[in-house]
Image (spheres, rainbow, N blue to C red):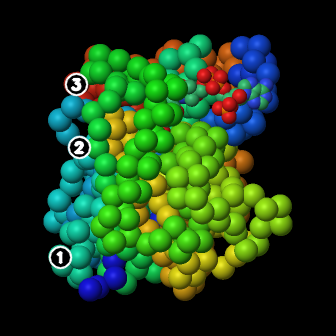
Amino acid sequence: MVSVGIDALALATTHVQVPLSALADALDVPVGKYHKGLGQERMSIPALDEDAITMGAEAATKLLAHTGTDGIRTLLYASESGVDQSKAGGVFVHGILGLPRHIRTVELKEACYGGTAALQTALAFVARNPEEKALVIASDIARYTTDESGEPTQGAGAVAMLVSANPRLVEIEPVSGVYTLDINDFWRPNDSSTPYVHGHVSMDAYMDAFTGAWDDYRAYGGRDIGEFARFVHHQPFGKMARKAHARLMEYTGVHLQATNDTVNTDDSVIEAGLIYGRHIGNSYTAALYIGLASLLGNDSEDLTHKKIGMFSYGSGAVSEFFCAVPQPGYREVLAQTGADARSVMDMLDARTEVDFRTYRVMHAALRTDSEDFETPSQTTGPYRWAGVQGKIRRYSATS
Ligand code: CAA
């Protein structure tokens, strides 16, 4: 069987960020709750002229500047920050980037699991015709109601991935464990710009969906737990991934440690994957793949041909467990699209920091109607959401 997987990957986030220390001060919450209790330091928030489309377009631009568009026949756009009930977000990105016309484009949605749904669909297309490539874009703004428990877990991020045969970054193995259970842990009805969340119910739902997907993975011939060198678990906030990992170790009865671990902790096999998310916040569909980039870019061990367990969770709820295998030279491949550790940290440092008051004003200013309006010029990114004209969302390049 032909090897298929992620040939190259690029990341983007918004160009504004809020330190959680500012949120803690303003809300009179001990900062330790956010830094240690949730495992988060900062959250990316959108400028008033940024949205999931501008982020997705920026990630795709970085990717395609290196890979080109040859062979791409499919564009799968995953998001739960949809900007239109009918038109796929990927079609907006296609237009902004001026991509070739002979591409099928569609949007996929199932909360944070959507990115994995897009990836697995892309892998199936490529396995059917290994000459073809697929562009997967997962992009989200995690925006919660202010003064509710989800507020410090907001964030924003996008990932663009080129899926191909004989991939240069990671191979994705064919065995998957899958799981669906209809549960109301987190959802966003059509008339709301923020989700309704039963926070602790959602944490339990995540854990149950994890063991459910793991059992299915094993039942379908998946690897033994002891074969994995590292794990990346969906990370709405870092502590959630730590809790999930502890559950997996307890459930399987096997406690794994990285060979480069000096402090003997179970978390040594997930630690490097949590670095970017701590500074970006939740990015829903993109979060798992931002975690993968963080692991590949920051783990001090050479992970070539090692087995990485990947757990994807989307509220509602759908989950999947599968295995990614880094290929020789994976670090160079990351660097080609600006997804190496240094470039990503530079990208994060370049964001404009705003204080609590400014953040709250920006949060309140989001427009979701379709009357004519123009957004103020704020973003320092390459694309901006210019507003709405004639009921149509308008985008433009900033230079
Ligand atoms: N110093 C250090 N730690 C502290 C502390 C302090 N001063 N004060 C509290 N803590 C710790 C608590 O002990 C707790 O840690 P443990 O869970 O390990 O005990 C942690 O900080 C959080 O405290 P609470 O549980 O009291 O926090 P909360 O109830 O206010 O909010 C939350 C937590 C419910 C998850 C909330 O952030 C939320 O609603 N988030 C959005 C929903 C979410 O992300 N769910 C995750 C699963 S669903 C999913 O994964 C999909 C998705 O992307 C949304």
At mark 3, the secondary structure is: loop
Relative placement, left or right, of 82 versus 343 is: left
Q: Position of residue 369 (x, y in %)?
A: 31, 18
Mark on residue 88?
2
Image quarter of residue 42:
top right
Q: Is residue 195 above or below residue 47?
A: above
- Camera sees residue 193: yes
Residue 240, position in %: x, y? 58, 41
- According to the image, label 1 marks what residue? 128
Task: Of the two numbered discs 3 and 1 on the same chain, state the one appearing first in sequence.
Answer: 1
Marks 2 and 3 close (CB-CB < 8 Å): no
Q: Mark 2: is the Cβ under 8 angstroms from ligand 1?
A: no
Q: Tell me the number on the disc at residue 390.
A: 3
Q: Quarter of the picture for ligand 1?
A: top right
Q: Is mark 3 within 8 Å of ligand 1?
A: no
Left or right of 347 on screen, residue 319: left
Q: Amino acid at mark 3?
A: Gly
Q: Can residue 110 be spotted in the picture?
A: no
Q: Mark 2 or 3 closer to N-term?
A: 2
Mark 1, mark 2: which one is toward the viewer? 1
- How packed mark 2 is, by other alpha carbons closer than 10 Å (few <14, some 14-19, many 20 or more), is many
In the rendering, at what x and y percent does residue 329 appear? Answer: 57, 84
**Marker count (numbered):** 3
**Is disc 3 in contact with disc 1, using a CB cutoff of under 8 Å?**
no
